[in-house]
Image: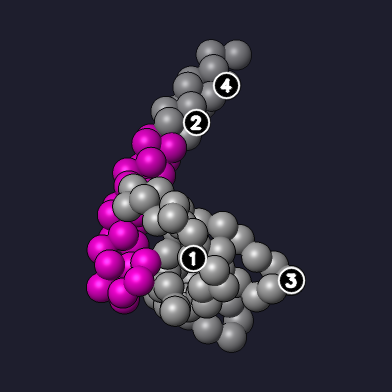
Amino acid sequence: MILYRYIAAYPTEFQPAGLVLEKHEVIKETPKGYWIGPAWKKRWISNYNRARFAYPTKEEAMVHFTKRTTRRIEFLKIQIKTCEDAMAAAKLMNLNK
């Protein structure tokens, strides 16, 4: 059995930024999850929907990717706003010297 996970690929000198589909081989299935990966680098993942790392279908993996990435963008927007506010405060402090 193969489980799927989409990830955002960072640009390199060899490839542009984009979307990558990872395929994870299931080594063993348990009542609560799966052992995935090559034998020398096994990883246990839950099969509970909200905590899943990878999904049985590409469609489910894409739905999770879009939810995960939307949430990530919202967090990053908050961080950008915080940094902009801190920079503005720093500039005011420098002007008041």
Q: Residue at x 28, y 54 (%)?
A: 67
Q: Which residues are magenta?
A: 55-81
| CB contact under 8 Å: marks 4 and 1 | no
Task: State whether residue 38 appears in this view.
Answer: yes
Q: Quadrant of residue 64?
A: bottom left
Percent x, y for residue 65? 34, 62
Marks 3 and 2 close (CB-CB < 8 Å): no
Q: Amino acid at mark 2?
A: Met
- Density class for disc 2 (Cα within 10 Å; few <14, some 14-19, many ≥20) is few
Other residues around mark 3 within 10 Å, as few (<14) / some (14–19) / many (≥20): few
Q: Residue furthest right?
A: 40
Q: Nearer the viewer, mark 4 or mark 3?
A: 3
Q: Which residue is mark 4?
A: 94
Q: Distance of mark 4 from mark 3, alpha carbons?
A: 55 Å
Which callout, 4 or 3, points at the residue further toward the start of the chain?
3
**Which residue occupies 43% across, 31% down?**
82
Quadrant containing the C terminus in the rendered view: top right
| Circle 1 Cα neighbour tier, 10 Å, few/some/many (<14 / 14–19 / ≥20) | some
Residue 85 appears at what percent x and percent y? 42, 28
Give the quadrant of the N terminus.
bottom left
Depth order, front residue of 37/90: 37
